[in-house]
Amino acid sequence: MENVNNLNGQVPAIKFKDTKTKQVSGAICVSTPEQIRLGLLEEKLASDEYGNVTIEQECDTQIVMSPEVARSLIKMLEDNLASNNL
């Protein structure tokens, strides 16, 4: 995060992958005073050697950010939800 926070006014380029958007079934969050790590979970069907089928949650994507960026992101999400009456 230090590199992103010390760009002297420059804005980093954002690139989007050309992959299909996946549905997220949940999220987990772990933090320290310096950083917050958000893991997005995806549900998948799995089976064992006996044919038993279970649903597993797999961490598909991780996002690491500073607490300041996390607060800004939460504020943006709240404003977006409010403007769409959600």
Image (spheres, rainbow, N blue to C red):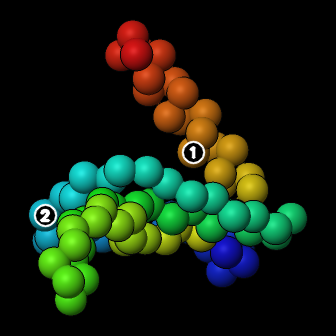
Q: Residue at x 38, y 70 (%)?
A: 58
Q: Which mark is residue 20?
A: 2
The one nearer the camera, 46 or 2, is 46
Q: Amino acid at mark 1?
A: Leu
Q: Residue at x 65, y 51 (%)?
A: 70
Residue 51 seen in the figure: yes
State if disc 1 and disc 2 touch (CB < 8 Å).
no
**C-alpha distance separating marks 2 and 1:** 23 Å
Q: Residue at x 54, y 27 (%)?
A: 78
Residue 19 lies left or right of residue 80; in this view the side is left
Mark 2, secondary structure of its residue: loop
The single residue placed furthest to the bottom in the displayed view is 49
Q: Quadrant of the C terminus?
A: top left
Would you name the residue on which mark 1 appears?
73
- Asked if 43 appears above or below 61 in the picture, the reply is above
Residue 14 seen in the figure: no
Residue 81 lies left or right of residue 1; in this view the side is left
Tag nearer the camera, 2 or 1: 2
Is tag 2's residue or tag 1's residue first in the polypeptide sequence? Answer: 2
In this rendering, the count of numbered labels is 2
Q: Quadrant of the N terminus?
A: bottom right
The one nearer the camera, 41 or 66, is 41
Residue 46 position, x and y percent, is: 23, 74
Q: Amino acid at mark 2?
A: Lys
Residue 46 lies left or right of residue 66; in this view the side is left
Q: Which mark is residue 42?
A: none
Residue 18 position, x and y percent, is: 14, 71
Other residues around mark 1 within 10 Å, as few (<14) / some (14–19) / many (≥20): few
- Asked if 48 appears above or below 5 in the picture, the reply is below
Mark 1, secondary structure of its residue: helix
The single residue placed furthest to the front in the displayed view is 50
Q: Quadrant of residue 53?
A: bottom left
